[in-house]
Amino acid sequence: MPAYHLHLRLEPQAFYRTLGLRASGAWATLDPLAPKSARALERLELFVRSGAARLAEVRLRESPSAAELEACEWFELGNRFFKGDPGFSLWDDYPSCRSAAVPDGIHLFACCVVSAEFRAVVRARRLRGLEFLRVKEKSRKPKLAWFVALARAPLGQGVDHPWFDRARWEAYLRAHPAETRDQDPTRPPGHFRGVWVRDAAYRSEPLLAGLLRLVPEKSETPLAGLTVLPVARYWRERIPAADFAYVPVGRDGPNREGKMLRFRALCASRRARDALLRAGLLRDQDTVPLAVVDAPPAAAPNLDLLHPPAPAMYTGAELAALRAEE
């Protein structure tokens, strides 16, 4: 069974102390399945029903249990925040950056730009599925060589969460094309609102039933009501026989100049992720666990069978042209 973190934005905020919740700014976080949280949520429900308090926003974040994390097979490699601007952009005719703006200890940024040390570990450990394109240097005094890490295969389209009502979500996308143009209907969304939770899930899941009592209005409005942030899921049949793969970030499309942009994030097998951790190039918190499932939920479509796989960041012709300038 997965773990959850419940993030509450309560109004008025004075009720945090009344409920014994420790707030950080406008938010309080608790484990909704922990016994000690049950009493606080029961009291909160009474305040909401009476009209004394209101939950402006609720975010339910799913995470792997300890056992699931131990068995996790794939991870998305995240970017560590830093203040400098290395100036990397896919808008450039050839990828370039200012390495002097990247702090020491950073070996991955912009989802796919990696250091020479990163490349060295991949080659020394014979990790599969990744090739490298040298990044053009913009700094007058460069620190390190940097490379675009190009995974050769996709991880798959992804699998919908069992609670997610795709039909309602796709109807919303069709009704609001201007506001949802960055949403890709061929893939599961990174989060979904309470209105896009299946009615059957509200009836069968005690956790969701309790949240529905706290936030009865199923809002389509961002930053309001319930939002579910699930663990990303992928179909085992589409997992490549490799140590690296890519997943799309946002929706592919041309920029104002007509250049096709395909943003891709880098994913690593446990073997590759552990090798990078041991080398000190990544921290545990820089990797996001992914779930690999044997089949989609019974009521969900198989997106990998309905849609072609997402193309790589560069087509073969585009990459060949870049190689000629490398």
Image (cartoon, grey):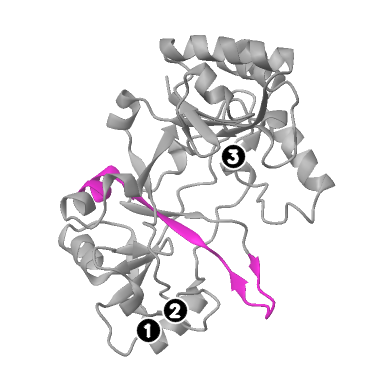
Identify the amino acid type marked 3: His
Q: Are marks 2 and 1 in contact (CB under 8 Å)?
A: yes
Whether residue 134 is situated above or below residue 63 in the rendered picture = below
Nearer-N-terminus badge (3/1): 1
- Residue toward you, 104 or 308: 104
Residue under numbered circle 2 = 95
In space, the residues marked 3 and 2 are separated at their CA atoms by 30 Å
Residue 17 visible? The answer is: yes
Look at discs 3 and 2 and give the one toward the viewer.
3
Identify the amino acid type marked 2: Pro
Residue under numbered circle 3 = 191
Identify the amino acid type marked 1: Lys
Q: Are marks 3 and 2 in contact (CB under 8 Å)?
A: no
Determine the secondary structure under disc 1. strand
The magenta stretch spans which residues? 253-274
Q: Residue at x 76, y 53 (%)?
A: 179
